[in-house]
């Protein structure tokens, strides 16, 4: 069971939901500054996604928790991050599968789905813990990723 305390995000919305998930995945950072992390290795990523909004859908959901798991966990679990060439690149630092970029890409994937919903919720924070001692918080700027 995942039980962690996450950094809080300030937002103006009435509702906020949080979905936790674990993703087992491998990656490498294709840069000499990464040291040993330039070699392929694996993590159990702990991800927390925060979605907020003022309106619920016809089910009384901001978004179905299960849908969030489907679009994020199912996409990455037991994969190699670098193999997702539609998202990550081994030649551009903005797209290396670092914790920072993984968090941003998850926010982009989630927001793209939220944009299709009639109640128009917003992804306001993505927390990604890559190791017991290292995590990133990504907060999209209002109105853009
Ligand atoms: N800013 C970032 N720095 C590092 C990243 C990253 O994504 N963003 N990634 C790595 C490596 O991929 C590595 O998996 C994680 O490194 P680190 O936190 O050093 O992992 P350790 O478990 O070895 O940490 P200790 O606290 O030393 O046990 C490197 N840097
Ligand atoms: Zn790593």
Image (tube, rainbow, N blue to C red):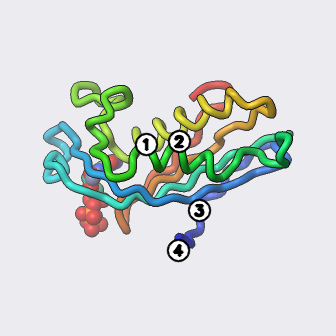
Question: What residue lies at 64% left-to-right and 40% top-to-bottom?
Answer: 123
Establish if 110 lies above or below 27. above
Residue 87 x %, y %: 38, 30
Asked whether mark 2 lies closer than 8 Å to ligand 1, one says: no
Contact flag, marks 2 and 1 (Cβ < 8 Å): yes
The label on residue 1 is 4
Q: Earlier in the sequence, mark 2 or mark 4?
A: 4
Q: Which residue is mark 2?
A: 71
Q: What's the distance in space between the residues labelled 4 and 1, CA to CA?
A: 21 Å
Q: Earlier in the sequence, mark 4 or mark 1?
A: 4
User: Where residue 75 is drawn, which disc sits there?
Assistant: 1
Query: How crowded is the residue under tag 4: few (<14 C-alpha within 10 Å), some, or many (20+)?
Result: few
**Residue 61 point in image, percent of width and height:** 79, 48
**In this rendering, does residue 54 appear at all?**
no
Q: Which residue is mark 3?
A: 6
Write down the quadrant of residue 33 in the picture.
top left
Residue 28 placement, left or right of 59: left
* Marks 4 and 1 close (CB-CB < 8 Å): no
Check mark 3 vs ligand 1: CB closer than 8 Å? yes or no: no
Residue 23: tell me if it is visible: yes
In which quadrant is the C terminus drawn?
A: top right
10 left or right, relative to 98: right
């Amino acid at each position: 069971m995942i039980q962690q305390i996450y950094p809080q995000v300030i937002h103006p919305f009435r509702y906020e939901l949080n979905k936790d998930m674990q993703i087992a995945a491998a990656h490498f950072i294709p840069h000499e500054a990464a040291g040993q992390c330039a070699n392929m290795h694996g993590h159990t990523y702990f991800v927390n996604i925060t979605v907020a909004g003022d309106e619920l859908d016809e089910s009384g959901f901001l978004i179905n928790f299960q849908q969030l798991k489907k679009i994020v966990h199912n996409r990455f679990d037991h994969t190699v991050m670098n193999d997702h060439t539609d998202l990550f690149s081994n030649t551009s630092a903005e797209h290396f599968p670092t914790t920072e970029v993984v968090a941003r890409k998850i926010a982009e994937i989630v927001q793209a789905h939220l944009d299709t919903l009639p109640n128009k919720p917003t992804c306001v924070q993505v927390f990604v813990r890559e190791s017991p001692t290292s995590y990133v918080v990504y907060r999209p700027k209002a109105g853009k990723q």
